[in-house]
């Protein structure tokens, strides 16, 4: 059984690892972000050209209104996506910290809860409890905690803690090496949860 200090160290390592995974994902997302920003600039230019065409009597008011509606809808979508990039980055980091804090301190939390609260804590961690032979219980974690409590993820966190980097095989599309990870592997994409 691990001590609270060991549990907190693992949580800290997982937070660092997941932070690096999020940073790597952000680098990939920045490509889409730049494309959206470029598209937004083009749409804003098109909007100005439409107005100029209207003033030059090259387009009817009905056509102007229709085109402005189309451009406005595309701009709204792009603006929403760009805001989602910003909000998603902050939200993901806050949620990681909250999930890890809850996992590291679950025993303390659970021991202070009444029955209703214990049920809510159970629902945060588990999707299913199954009673099997000899009064044993099998559990199925929620998607978030499947990842956090997965031994392969913990091994990745240990590698990250020693080397301050994500194991190269975790970033590969088809990992071929699993040294330092005791044969276990997960990919960066496995860390995404809802």
Image (cartoon, grey):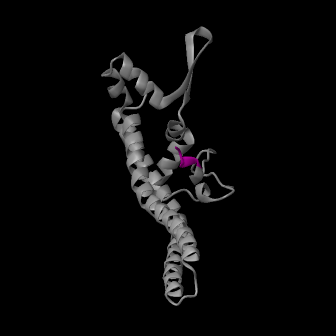
Q: Position of residue 105 (x, y in %)?
A: 35, 33
Residue visible at 57% across and 71% down in the picture = 66
Count of numbered circles on the image: 0
Left or right: 130, with 1 as reference point: right
Query: Furthest residue to the left?
Result: 112
* Any part of residue 143 in sight: yes
Q: Return the residue nearer the eye: 24 or 57.
A: 57
Tell me the quadrant of the picture where the N terminus can be found.
Answer: top left
Q: Return the residue nearer the eye: 142 or 104.
A: 142
Query: Furthest residue to the bottom?
Result: 56
Left or right: 123, with 102 as reference point: right
Residue visible at 46% across and 65% down in the picture = 79
Q: Is residue 109 above or below residue 87?
A: above
* Any part of residue 164 in sight: no
Q: Is residue 103 above or below residue 134?
A: below
Residue visible at 61% across and 52% down in the picture = 179
* Residue range of the region highlighted in magenta in the rendering: 190-194
Q: Position of residue 71 (x, y in %)?
A: 54, 71
Q: Position of residue 78 (x, y in %)?
A: 51, 66
Q: Quadrant of residue 137?
A: top right
Q: Return the residue nearer the eye: 55 or 154.
A: 55
Q: Position of residue 76 (x, y in %)?
A: 49, 64
Can residue 165 be found in the magenta stretch? no
Residue visible at 63% across and 51% down in the picture = 178
Predominant SS along the magenta part: loop
Query: Furthest residue to the top?
Result: 134
């Amino acid at each position: 059984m691990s001590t609270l200090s060991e549990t907190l160290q693992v949580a800290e390592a997982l937070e660092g690892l997941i932070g690096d995974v999020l940073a790597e994902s952000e680098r990939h997302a920045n490509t889409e972000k730049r494309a959206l920003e470029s598209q937004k600039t083009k749409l804003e230019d098109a909007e100005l050209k439409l107005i100029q065409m209207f003033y030059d009597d090259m387009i009817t008011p009905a056509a102007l209104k229709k085109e402005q509606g189309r451009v406005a809808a595309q701009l709204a979508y792009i603006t929403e996506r760009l805001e989602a990039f910003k909000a998603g980055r902050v939200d993901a980091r806050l949620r990681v910290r909250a999930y890890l804090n809850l996992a590291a301190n679950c025993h303390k939390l659970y021991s202070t809860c009444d029955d209703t609260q214990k049920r809510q804590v159970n629902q945060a961690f588990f999707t299913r409890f199954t009673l099997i032979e000899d009064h044993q219980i099998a559990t199925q974690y929620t998607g978030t905690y499947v990842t956090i409590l997965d031994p392969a993820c913990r091994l990745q966190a240990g590698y990250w803690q020693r080397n301050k980097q994500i194991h190269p095989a975790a970033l590969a599309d088809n990992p071929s090496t699993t040294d330092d990870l005791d044969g276990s592997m997960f990919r960066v994409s496995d860390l995404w949860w809802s």
